[in-house]
Amino acid sequence: MEGTNPVNKKLAAALSGGAVLVLALSGCGGGDGNEKLDAWAKQVCDAVQPQAKKIAAANAAIQKETSDSSTPAEVQKTDAQAFQDMSDAYKAIGTAVNKAGPPDVENGEKKQQDAVKELNGISSSYASLRKQVDALDTKDQAKFADGLKDIATELDKLSQSGNDALRTLEEGEVGQAMAQQESCQSASASPSVTQG
C-alpha cells in the first residue's frame, strides 16, 4: 500500500500547518487590564478552546491514518471526517468572534469583521476539501494517490494563507488580553496531540 502513504504524509504535514492558525488565536504576553477587552477576550477564548481541541483531534486522526498501511477507503473516510470537523470548528470560531462583537480597541470593528470573514472562508475551504476527498476513486490506488496530492497542495495553500486578519485582530492589547485568559493559554499549550 505504499502508493498512498507518502502522499498521505504530505497531507498530514500540510494539515499541521493549518493547526497553527487556531493557535495563532491564543497569543501570549500580558498587560494592564482593560475590563471591557478582558471580558471580550474571555468570551472568545472560552469559545475557541473546544474548537482548537477539535482541530487538533482532526489533525491527529489524519496523522494516525498516515502512519499505518491504511487502505484508500480508510484514508478517505478519516480525511473526510477530519475536514468536516475542521470546517465546523472554524465556522464556530467565526461565530464566536462575531458574537463577541468588536474588541474595545482602535479599528476594533474592522478587525473583528475581517477575522470573521477569514474564519468563514477557511471553514468553506475545508468543506470543499471534504467534497474533494469524498469524490476520490478509492478502487484505483494511483488515481487516489493523485487526488490526494491535489488535496495536499490545496491544504498547503490554505495553511499558508488565511492568518492575516486573525493576526491583525490579535495585535497589541487584544493579544495581551487573550493571553491572560486561561482558556486561551490551554488552547495554545496543546498544539501537538500525538498520543493515539
Image: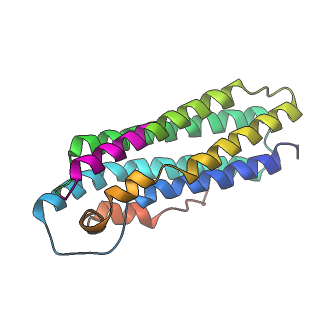
* Residue 120: x %, y % from top left: 41, 37
Q: Residue at x 77, y 34 (%)?
A: 147
36 in magenta: no
> In this figure, which colouring scheme has been used for the structure?
rainbow
Q: Nearer the viewer, residue 86 or 195?
A: 86
Q: Nearer the viewer, residue 73 or 123?
A: 123
8 or 53, which is in the foreground?
8
* Residue 45 location, quadrant: bottom left
Which quarter of the rendering shows the C terminus?
bottom right
Q: How many numbered discs, if any?
A: 0
- Residue 39, position as x, y percentages in the image: 16, 57
Residue 46 in the image: x percent, y percent? 28, 53
Which picture quadrant has residue 90? top left
Residue projecting furthest to the left: 35
The residue that appears at 37% across and 62% down in the rendered structure is 26
How far across and down, in percent of the image, does residue 163 sit?
Answer: 46, 53
Which corner quadrant holds the N terminus? top right
Instruction: Report the magenta stretch's main SS.
Output: helix
Q: Is residue 45 above or below residue 154?
A: below
Q: Is 184 left or right of 32, judged from the image as shown?
A: right
Q: Which residues are magenta?
A: 105-120
In reply to whether residue 110 is colored magenta, the answer given is: yes
Q: Nearer the viewer, residue 154 or 20?
A: 154
Q: Is residue 73 left or right of residue 167?
A: right
